[in-house]
Image (cartoon, grey):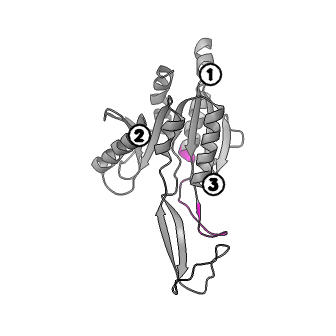
């Protein structure tokens, strides 16, 4: 038992969670309703199971722990998370990476008023209408394999619309594009619980976050 605990303690796990935000101007921003709860629960589960865990949590997350049993970092924007992750990849050798952060899908490219005049970037005036052009943000997960070449890599796919079949297809596409090992499916399109999809197209159901963690423990150990 002692040997098992020592072996797990030598294995590092990186978890991202919570929302990012993208600035509109210096006082306004785009974000989402992610709380960070899932990632915090998963970090706690792995830490209490004997692994060394580093959690990178969105600064707007509403879930906080007083004395977390793992190392905790913070991020704001998509680029901020990417820079933090790159730094951690240089300092640590992670056996597993779970990218559960709810990142912004869009970034503000341009804001102009009805006359085509570009808005002030400090604070947009409220006495006129504006047109805001947003562009798709890059998918960070698709860059993870380059900095985590040997880690067991898992992404997330949360969908509100669609159904089980469409979500399954999107999960497979995410794995193919990113070179990840697994994709966790959840949200109204999936239903209750979580679906853990692997590269072979097999889907395993997990009824709770703890079940997700339990599923991956043997996979993490086997990958070492």
Relative image position of residue 37 (x, y in whole percent): 56, 46
Mark 2 in CB contact with mark 3 (< 8 angstroms): no
Residue at 65% across, 40% down: 87
Few, some or many C-alpha atoms within 10 Å of disc 2 (few <14, some 14-19, many ≥20)? many
The residues tagged by marks 3 and 1 sit, at their Cα atoms, a distance apart of 29 Å
Residue positioned most to the right: 67
First reached walking from the N terminus: tag 2 or tag 1: 1
Relative image position of residue 12 (x, y in whole percent): 60, 28
Residue at 36% across, 40% down: 176
Relative image position of residue 165 (x, y in whole percent): 28, 47
Residue positioned most to the left: 165
- Kindly identify which residue carries mark 3: 76
- Kindly identify which residue carries mark 2: 183
Residue at 63% across, 17% down: 6
Few, some or many C-alpha atoms within 10 Å of disc 1 (few <14, some 14-19, many ≥20)? some
The residues tagged by marks 2 and 1 sit, at their Cα atoms, a distance apart of 25 Å
Please say whether residue 29 is visible from this viewpoint: yes
Helix, strand, or loop for circle 3? Answer: loop
Q: Foreground: 117 or 50? A: 117
Q: Foreground: 184 or 24? A: 24
- Kindly identify which residue carries mark 1: 10
**Magenta stretch containing residue 28, yes or no?**
yes
Image quadrant holding the N terminus, namely top right
Determine whether 63 is above or below 119 in the image.
above
Magenta residues span: 22-38
Helix, strand, or loop for circle 2? Answer: strand
Q: Tell me which secondary structure the magenta stretch mostly adopts.
A: loop
């Amino acid at each position: 038992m002692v040997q098992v605990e020592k072996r797990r303690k030598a294995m590092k796990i990186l978890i991202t969670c919570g929302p990012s935000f993208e600035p509109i101007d210096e006082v306004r921003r785009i974000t989402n309703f992610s709380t960070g709860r899932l990632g915090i629960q998963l970090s706690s589960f792995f830490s209490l199971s004997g692994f060394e865990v580093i959690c990178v949590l969105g600064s707007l997350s509403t879930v906080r722990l007083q004395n977390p049993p793992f190392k905790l970092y913070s991020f704001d924007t998509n680029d901020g998370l990417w820079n933090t992750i790159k730094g951690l990849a240089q300092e640590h050798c992670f056996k597993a990476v779970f990218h559960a952060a709810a990142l912004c899908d869009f970034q503000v490219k341009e804001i102009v008023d009805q006359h085509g005049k570009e808005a002030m970037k400090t604070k947009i005036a409220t006495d006129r209408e504006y047109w805001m052009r947003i562009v798709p943000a890059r998918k960070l997960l698709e860059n993870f394999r380059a900095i985590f070449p040997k880690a067991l890599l898992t992404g997330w796919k949360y969908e509100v619309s669609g159904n089980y079949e469409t979500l399954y297809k999107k999960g497979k596409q995410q794995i193919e594009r990113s070179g990840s090992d697994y994709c966790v499916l959840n949200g109204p399109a999936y239903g209750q619980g979580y679906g853990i999809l692997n590269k072979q197209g097999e889907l395993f159901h997990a009824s709770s976050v703890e079940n997700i963690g339990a599923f991956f423990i043997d996979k993490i150990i086997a990958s070492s």
